[in-house]
Image (spheres, rainbow, N blue to C red):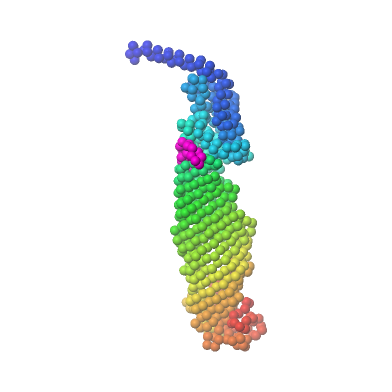
């Protein structure tokens, strides 16, 4: 430094020292004692929150830069309607220096270290007359400070339960007109959650106060982004674009407190589109959805409450139902069509259609169904579902409200290809033909096995132009013969088949069976143990040249065939009629059908 500059340097230093000394004398005079400054700061915060703010000892006052440090207590905050109390052992508030010179207290920023935030039992607690959303908007419209910093905070419910830990937030009011930026993170039920919020200026509209808002939330259970307009009137509501991704919806539901078991369904859930929400209801007007590898478009809404409700009309190009079919001898409330546990704990009104469906290896084709659930009682209807070359229709009911599930099914399978339907189940029964099945059945139980064993109802079967894997002509031509297993190469073709059956205690019993073949009529009766998959049948083979009449049935012995054993590999035998009266099955004289053994 040149010699002639040194006097100016020391002059500047001296001037700064004089100013600092002057301010040190002026500020305490302008603001009063530290106790008076504390009371003025507490009063400003109390006016903003609508409650009582107490700044506790030990209190430190600094003037360069101007700030206060100590303890912090907030109670009865009418303008923060969800908050009952806030306590922090460490707080710091900085003040506007220029305003201090004028003798006024203007807060710049507030920092709370390790605060405990206790929420109210409900938003209405405390007797506030102004709606929750409106109070929140007012609190953001003209805050007394521009920045709030919360470090390692804890949020508790009114009962004292810890809801959020490690709460870290940076809030910036930016201009005191509702413009707000927030960035932070917290721990919720063991998962780290990061979030950000940007809000534009709050304006008055005919629908109430409104502001543009962008919210982002990121965690392992859920990732979400919303960009749109939020309005505050009688309640919070808004509309905009939203994207949500849940890698595992079961994990998400358990995370937020809805306990459900592990399962194969509700994986890779995603929703995006234009969304509207009002209060606790969120609706996608024209959304795009993904669920378990299935993609759909349509309307979908969720209402959050102690018993959530979902509604929607969804259209799928392809819909794979396998994740919802359950497996093993699981609970009876794991039922085909949807997870019974979920439907037990939520209400639903869903209409689903698909260009193509598949389940358990079956290509179901085009169709649709509805699901209605309320209070654990579920009803559904299938309309014109393409199945095995034919169509299925009907309605089903489930009562999941108790420990024991009660189920019912009334339906028709029309024009289905028997071999096509049986093939995916690998039953090893080479049946062919076009069949129509009408059924009206019901059951009850606590496991899938109990549901099967409890089956009761009526089943009627008709079929045309097919074949059964039993060589009836060969069996009729020999006096005694038998075979283990179905006839693979030489079955019996039929032009028509009719069976009138009933279900009882898990057994399918066909009291009347008539099959017209090119060689004659085969009639009989028998049944199947559905759970054990075993058969027990008797057949009578009529003479195609000289059909039996009533007297011949008594005096003569028509060929008789028995069928019993496992469904996949039964024993098929020719059995001549025993001596008259020695255990013979009773036969209706007007028909050639054998009665049950």
Q: Seen in the image, is 101 located left or right of residue 373?
A: left
The tally of labels here is 0
Q: Seen in the image, is 47 located left or right of residue 5?
A: right
Relative vertical location of residue 19 with respect to residue 244 in this rendering, above or below: above
The spot of residue 554 in percent (x, y) is 62, 86
Q: Is residue 419 visible?
A: no
The residue lying at 51 percent from left, 83 percent from top is 519
Relative vertical location of residue 475 with respect to residue 196 in this rendering, above or below: below
**Residue 204 among those drawn in magenta:** yes
**Residue 389 among those drawn in magenta:** no
Front residue of 488 and 27: 27
- Residue furthest to the front in view is 206
- Residue furthest to the right in view is 581
The spot of residue 86 in percent (x, y) is 58, 33
Front residue of 214 and 570: 214
Q: Is residue 110 visible?
A: yes
The spot of residue 62 in percent (x, y) is 52, 21
The spot of residue 577 in percent (x, y) is 61, 83
Point out the image quarter for the C terminus.
bottom right
The residue lying at 56 percent from left, 51 percent from top is 309
Point out the image quarter for the N terminus.
top left
Relative vertical location of residue 144 with respect to residue 306 in this rendering, above or below: above
The residue lying at 59 percent from left, 34 percent from top is 78
Front residue of 509 and 424: 509
What is the span of residues highlighted in magenta in the rendered image?
197-217
Front residue of 255 and 238: 238
Q: Main secondary structure of the magenta part?
A: strand
The residue lying at 53 percent from left, 74 percent from top is 462
């Amino acid at each position: 430094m040149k010699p002639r500059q040194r006097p100016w340097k020391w002059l500047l230093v001296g001037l700064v020292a004089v100013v600092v000394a002057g301010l040190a004398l002026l500020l305490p005079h302008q603001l009063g004692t530290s106790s008076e400054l504390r009371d003025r700061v507490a009063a400003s915060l109390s006016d903003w929150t609508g409650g009582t703010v107490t700044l506790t000892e030990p209190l430190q006052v600094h003037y360069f830069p101007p700030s206060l440090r100590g303890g912090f207590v907030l109670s009865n905050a009418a303008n923060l309607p969800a908050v009952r109390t806030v306590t922090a052992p460490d707080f710091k508030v900085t003040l506007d220096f220029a305003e201090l010179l004028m003798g006024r207290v203007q807060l710049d920023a507030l920092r709370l270290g390790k605060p405990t935030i206790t929420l109210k039992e409900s938003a209405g607690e405390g007797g506030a007359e102004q709606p929750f959303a409106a109070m929140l908007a007012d609190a953001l419209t003209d805050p007394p400070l521009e920045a709030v910093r919360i470090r390692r905070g804890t949020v508790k419910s009114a009962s004292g339960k810890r809801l959020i830990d490690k709460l870290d937030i940076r809030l910036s009011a930016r201009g005191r007109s509702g413009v707000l930026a927030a960035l932070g993170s917290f721990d919720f039920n063991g998962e780290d959650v990061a979030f950000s919020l940007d809000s534009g200026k709050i304006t008055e509209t005919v629908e109430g106060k409104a502001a543009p808002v962008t919210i982002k939330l990121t965690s392992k259970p859920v990732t979400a982004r919303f960009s749109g307009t939020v309005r505050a009137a009688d309640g919070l509501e808004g509309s905009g674009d939203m994207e949500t991704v849940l890698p595992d919806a079961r994990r998400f539901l358990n995370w937020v407190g809805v306990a459900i078991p592990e399962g194969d369904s509700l994986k890779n859930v995603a929703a995006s589109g234009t969304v509207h929400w009002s209060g606790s209801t969120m609706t996608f007007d024209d959304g795009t959805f993904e669920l378990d590898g299935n993609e759909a478009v349509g309307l979908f809404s969720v209402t959050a409450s102690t018993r959530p409700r979902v509604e929607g009309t969804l259209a799928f190009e392809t819909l794979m139902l396998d994740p919802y079919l359950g497996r093993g001898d699981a609970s009876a409330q794991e039922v085909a069509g949807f997870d019974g546990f979920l439907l037990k704990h939520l209400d639903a009104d869903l209409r689903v259609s698909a260009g193509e469906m598949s389940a358990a290896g079956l290509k179901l084709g085009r169709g649709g169904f509805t699901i209605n659930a309320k209070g654990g009682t579920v009803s559904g209807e299938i309309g014109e579902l393409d199945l095995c070359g034919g169509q299925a229709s009907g309605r089903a009911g489930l009562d999941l409200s108790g420990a024991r599930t009660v189920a019912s099914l009334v339906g028709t399978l029309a024009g289905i290809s028997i071999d096509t339907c049986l093939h995916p189940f690998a039953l090893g029964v080479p049946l062919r033909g076009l069949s129509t099945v009408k059924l009206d059945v019901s059951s009850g139980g606590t496991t899938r096995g109990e549901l099967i064993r409890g089956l009761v109802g009526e089943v009627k079967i008709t079929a045309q132009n097919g074949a059964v894997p039993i060589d009836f002509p060969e069996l009729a031509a020999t006096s005694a013969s038998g075979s283990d297993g179905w006839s693979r190469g030489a079955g019996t073709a039929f032009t028509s088949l009719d069976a009138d059956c009933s279900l009882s205690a898990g057994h399918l019993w066909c009291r009347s069976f008539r099959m017209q073949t090119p060689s004659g009529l085969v009639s009989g009766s028998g049944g199947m143990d559905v759970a054990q998959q075993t058969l027990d049948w008797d057949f009578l083979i009529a003479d195609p040249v000289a059909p039996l009449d009533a007297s011949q049935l008594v005096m003569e012995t028509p060929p008789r065939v028995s069928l019993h054993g496992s469904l996949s590999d039964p024993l098929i035998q020719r059995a001549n009629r025993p001596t008259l009266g020695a255990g013979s099955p009773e036969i209706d004289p007007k028909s050639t059908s054998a009665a049950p053994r």
